[in-house]
Image: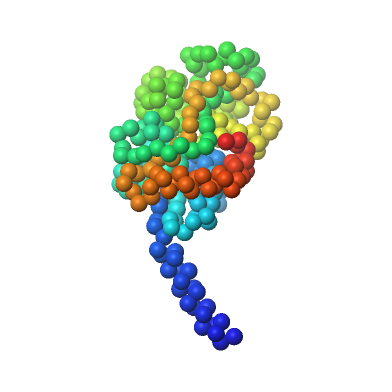
Amino acid sequence: MLTKLIALPFLILLYCGSLSAAEKVNVGGYLSPPFIEQDNQGNISGITLDLINSLNKIQHEYHFNLVLTSSRRRYVFFQQGQFDLFFFERKVWGWQDIAIVEIKLPFKGGDIFIALKSKAKQQDYFNSLKNKSISAMLGYHYNFADFNADPNFLRSKFDIQLSSDERVNVQLVLWGKMDIAIVTKSFLDKYLLDNPSAKSELLIATKMDQKYQHTILLRENTNLSVTTMNMLLDKLVASGEYNKIMQKYGITP
């Protein structure tokens, strides 16, 4: 018994030492369900957090940690060194002049238009945005706007309302306040999973505004290499953990 009591502090010190030896990797993220979302009590959840937790479980060389930012300030925060990695991003979304490398994720996404069925009878409703009010996300790069996310540009070209919550954008359409909303397919899939009755009220465009391959953006010359990150991703996929996380949010990778 005495031997066990003597050994216990040593094991605790050994465990703490292994944690302190782990290389810290800050992962940037902003509120964008289902990737990162926040409930009324301020609790953070989502795909990104689940991936971070899974990455920390399968290895101990790196400790991944979430750093919250905003969609518009993510570039500045990255250049200030506040984080080194970003899940579910694309270099063409404003990162072209920043020293980063892209790592492909096994997940394709896209942006899609929705409208009320009572107002939009057929798919040709989405053929033109002229004389239609649009609810969209602040800081997002859309194909219909030539990937220009500047709010002043968007307001000069379209009758557009920008928000930081895709749920609000969908609700504005459901309430008849806006003609069209553009949302990410991943958000819409999760929203309809949680609110199945909304599907009968919405006309969903069959043609996406854009389709894309989600990627990880990693700072150049950081201690976490592209090879290591790919190896960790492959491990999550091979174990079934990656698909399990995605299916939890109603997404098929």
Which quadrant would the N terminus be assigned to in this image?
bottom right
Which residue is found at the position 36% from the left and 28% from the top?
150
Residue 241 on image: x %, y %: 59, 47
Q: Quadrant of residue 174?
A: top right
For image coordinates 40% across by 52% down, the residue present is 25
Residue 145 image point, x, y percent? 42, 21
Relative placement, left or right, of 39 versus 66 is: right
Q: Position of residue 36 (x, y in %)?
A: 51, 44
Q: Is residue 109 visible?
A: yes
Q: Look at 40% across and 56% down and name the residue there.
A: 24
Residue 62 occupies quadrant = bottom left
Quadrant assignment for the C terminus: top right
Can residue 29 be seen by looking at this rendering? no
Q: Is residue 77 above or below residue 200?
A: below
The location of residue 14, given as percent across then percent down, is 46, 71
Q: Residue at x 36, y 23 (%)?
A: 153
Relative horizontal placement of residue 194, taking residue 167 as reference (left or right): right
Q: How is the image coloured?
A: rainbow
Circle count: 0
Does 61 sit above or below residue 192?
below
Q: Nearer the viewer, residue 222 or 247?
A: 222
